[in-house]
Image: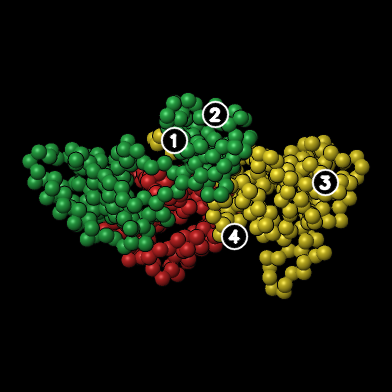
Amino acid sequence: MAVYSVFVVSRGGSLIYDIDYNVPKTDVEKTFGYPLDIVLKVFDEKLTVDFGARDGIKIGHYLLAVNGRPVQGTVFDDDRTDVREFLGQQQNYPISLKFGRIKLTVNEKIMLASMFHSLFAFGCQLSPEERSSGIQILEADTFKLHCRQTLTGIKFIVLTDPRLPYVEGLLKRLYELYSDYALKNPYYSIDMPIR
Amino acid sequence: MIFNLYIFDRLGTCVLYAEWNRKKPANLPKDEEFQNMYGMLFSLRSFVKRLSPLDCKDGFLNYQTSKYKLHYYETPSGLKLVMNTSTDVGDIRETLRQLYGQIYVEYVVKNPLCPLDKPITSDFFKDKLETFIKALPFY
Amino acid sequence: MSRPSKPGDPRKVSTELFTLTYGALVTQLIKDYEDEQEVNKQLEKMGYNIGIRLIEDFLARSNTGRCNDFRETAETIAKVGFRMFLNIAPVVTNWSPSGDTFSLLLDPNPLTEFVELPEDKYKLNYSNILCGVIRGALEMVQLEVQAWFVSDQLKGDSSTEMRVKFIRKLEDAVPAGED
């Protein structure tokens, strides 16, 4: 499926709805011997690859699991012991490590939503032409972002495969669904996260 | 149609700004506009990198609004080229690459008297740039 | 072993002129500074200034993107960079076990054609400018490295070997106001 995720951002820039569909996976699992020739660094309270990238493991990838045990930040998920201590002991080798990109947490999505909200405004401001709208399509090499801002200031954002043209139909449909299920529901307060 | 062009060095100094068909006058003084543009580019790059489901190779490429399209090309050495055009222009990454290789590298980098971290004053460079831009099919 | 210039191609310069120019430069530096270590330092500094501009030319002409790891960087320097500017293909060898240091075997070395180092100048690293070029060029693509010569055919060694060590990755400058 070509659509990766959908986000809805309120007038103030807060994320009120998000859903992921078919986010492609980048996990790579490999066995390593002692001493570990990949250099790990703590970044943002998580263990990430700093040096020694190869075979699909790239710089910036996070350590997701050790011998199948999931890792949370710098400690194991199950017993909260420090992963780095475990990696430093020779008797634990050979060891199987899984690396990959981390899925965005809810907090990160909220932050990215408000980031986009200001970028959208900048798009208007820095326009060389009169009366430009904000960013409608944003293209990167791995995804395409389609955005539609309604007259009330709500933004519907869809992330898709980069080859897709502007999904105007989908965005319009999202707006219709929003106006039906959210607004016509008397128990829903505007600008609050949608359940 | 090409509206304007910005070139930023790796530290964020705007070393070149040129405009051709800009209709809307900037409401801000130039320094602020350059700072805003650079700040926006920096945020866009990090936004794209974090949001991307796969590892980025090139990262942010361009964005489009109802009235203009902003194209972005960054070299591994940190030089950032930004060109604003009308919305009917397709992918001009190759054009920006040529601008970098054939104009900037040839007439600025290879000129030892041209400092790389200050705004470009070389008239030679500016003439070559004008000729290159005016010869583009979407000028 | 000169490359004859094609008639009408003003950009090609014969290797001989290049070797002569470099030789004159080193000789003048020795006359001015007298101390070989100081000359080595100056050559490295000059190389650095060349490197920071040369990288742009390299990126523009070779159309390479970012390298994914240090091994790729080493291969790109040897196979694409050296070939583009000096028309030689040094061999990448002697990787350290941690993968952060490698050697480049420069054979032949166009800078030292017809050069014979006098006995009293044994501390001079004749081709030290190349160390500076590599350091300057890699710094512009956010890699801090150290480059130095471990052996030199001019000094009677069997090969000319430059060692390049990765120090750290340089982070992009963050503009004022960002986190």
Give yes or no for contact between labels 3 and 1 (Cβ–Cβ under 8 Å): no
**Are the residues at dot 3 and dot 4 in contact (C-beta closer than 8 Å)?**
no
Return the residue at label 3: C152
- Looking at marks 2 and 1 on the same chain, the residue that comes earlier in the sequence is marked by 1
Letter of the chain in yellow: C
Front one among B120 and C83 = C83
Circle 4 SS class: helix
The kind of secondary structure element at disc 2 is helix
Which kind of residue does numbered mark 3 sit on?
Asp
How much space separates mark 4 and mark 1, taking CA atoms? Answer: 42 Å
- The location of residue B135, given as percent across then percent down, is 45, 70
Q: Picture quarter containing residue A30?
A: top right
Mark nearest the camera among 3 and 2 is 2
Q: Residue at x 56, y 37 (%)?
A: A95
- The chain letter under disc 2 is A
Q: Which chain is assigned red?
A: B
Residue A103 position within the rendered picture, expressed as x and y whole percent measured from the top left: 38, 42
The secondary element bearing badge 1 is classed as: strand
Q: Residue furthest right?
A: C119
- On the image, numbered disc 2 is attached to which residue? A86
Q: As shown in the figure, which amino acid type bears the numbered disc 4?
A: Ser
Mark 3 lies on a secondary structure that is loop
Label number found at residue A5: none
Disc 3 from disc 1: Cα separation:
51 Å
Query: Which is closer to the viewer, label 4 or label 1?
Result: 1
